[in-house]
Image (spheres, rainbow, N blue to C red):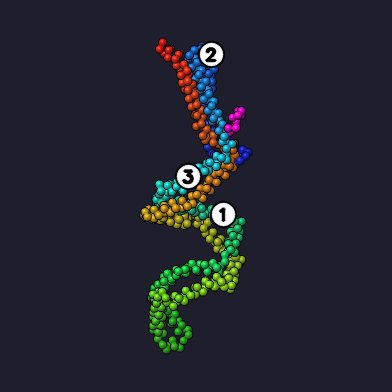
Amino acid sequence: MPPQPGAPGGVPIEDDSLSERAAALRRAKRQATGLLLAVVCVFALSYLLAPGLGQACLRAVAEAAMVGALADWFAVSALFRRIPLPFLQRHTDIIARNKERIGGNLAGFVRDKFLDAPSLVTMIRRHDPAGMLAHWLTEPANAGLLGRQVARLTLTALETLEDTKIQDFLGQAARALLGQIDLSHSMAAALGALTHEGRHQVLLDDVLERLGAMVRTEDARAFVTDTLVQWIRREHPLKQKLLPTDWLSGKGAAAITHAVDTLLKAVADDPRHELREALDSGLRRLISRLQSDPDWARRGEEVRAYLQNDEVLGSYVREMWSDLRQRLRADLGNEDSVLSRRVAGMGQWLGMSLAGDATLRVRLNVRLELWAATFAPDVAQSVAEHIRATVQRWDAREMAGLVELHIGRDLQYIRINGTVVGGCIGLLLFGLAHWGEILRRLLG
């Protein structure tokens, strides 16, 4: 019988195909049982026949077939249910009695044979996941599917975040996280990392180059000229009427921009320039004060308290988040979602990039192999624990019934084969025991 959901003693197991499997199991059982009954009838009828070699042979074959059928019936039935036979019942109902051991062995088998690092690395090398991803993403339909799925997940996340309790929890979590941050020391650490071994000088060089290029443009010179003209008219109106203001402003703008450009080039070309050293010195003093100055520590505490508790800031953040959430919901509710299209475009770009760069694919696969080798033991152990705990929660009787539904039909053929093989062995043994008499009859 199929297992009944909700049986006591564990969590019921759900399977939508139980009815079809139960029908197939019943048919197989009827076939095996029918064959057993047939050999029982043959055995009984053999006693109604006249004694002789043929009657003895028929009875021996039927007797051996019954023994084989009954033995295999016991072996198959003992897996799934208790059989009340003296001295033997302790070795029946094997699956239900050993549920926890089966779960542990199954978990260990999956962990050691499917999720072990060598197996995962071999699978990665055999299937080239980077190449498969590239091929999949280059198909426009697949990239569109990716965009739609990301949009669905984003919409689900937004719906989750609309829950008042979750919003309150996130707000509390954000305030608690801010409460754990030492702003002054964190800023000192960040500045220290940015300036370690002169890393900031590369950024300064780029800034100087961009500023110099901007100063040398006609727009910058026109801006300085206009500023000088406005300054002369505002601060020296009488001189503005007597002097050639536009000419002076143009010359002054050229001189100023040239001086600034010259200074920027000097700083850029000289790693030991005094302005560079002044910047380094100022950064070192700032880092030191952030680390040790009580006044800066107090200011950091004030900023943190402001971020945590200021109602105006909190109201502004909530309004901004509400507006962003509404915009996202409106976009995600549209079939032609901007987010979906952009994700699809990014996916297709990624696929084309991977497809056109064999070296990148190789490196990604190598990284996947390293990640698999690194994280496989922990992931495999977690999966094994999940399997073991899940099997442990199942109802033992229901699990035995479910296993029978899945493999019991094949096991019934063991009963049929046992009947046939038993009969054949009976015939063979009878022939060996009476070979002389059989030979005489055949020769006579």
Count residues near mark 2 (Cα–Cα under 10 Å), then give few for <14, some for 14-19, many for 20+: few
Q: CA distance from mark 2 to mark 1?
A: 80 Å
Q: Nearer the viewer, mark 1 or mark 3?
A: 3
Question: Which x, y percent locates residue 210?
Answer: 41, 71
Q: Does residue 160 appear left or right of residue 348 in this picture? A: right
Q: Which residue is mark 1?
A: 160
Q: Secondary structure at mark 3?
A: loop
Image height check: is 187 above or below 237? above
Residue 252 included in the magenta stretch of the image = no
Q: Does residue 246 appear left or right of residue 97 in this picture? A: left
Q: Is residue 223 visible?
A: no
Q: CA distance from mark 1 to mark 3?
A: 35 Å
Q: Return the mark for residue 114.
A: 3
Question: Which x, y percent locates residue 39?
Answer: 52, 21
Task: Verify CB contact (< 8 Å) between mark 3 and mark 2.
Answer: no
Residue closest to the far right: 8
Image height check: is 400 above or below 263? above
Comparing 410 with 24, the one in front is 410
- Segment colored magenta: 84-93
Count residues near mark 3 (Cα–Cα under 10 Å), then give few for <14, some for 14-19, many for 20+: few
Q: Which residue is mark 2?
A: 48
- Main secondary structure along the magenta-highlighted residues: loop
Q: CA distance from mark 3 to mark 2?
A: 60 Å
Q: Residue at x 45, y 55 (%)?
A: 343
Q: Amino acid at mark 3?
A: Phe
Q: Amino acid at mark 2?
A: Leu
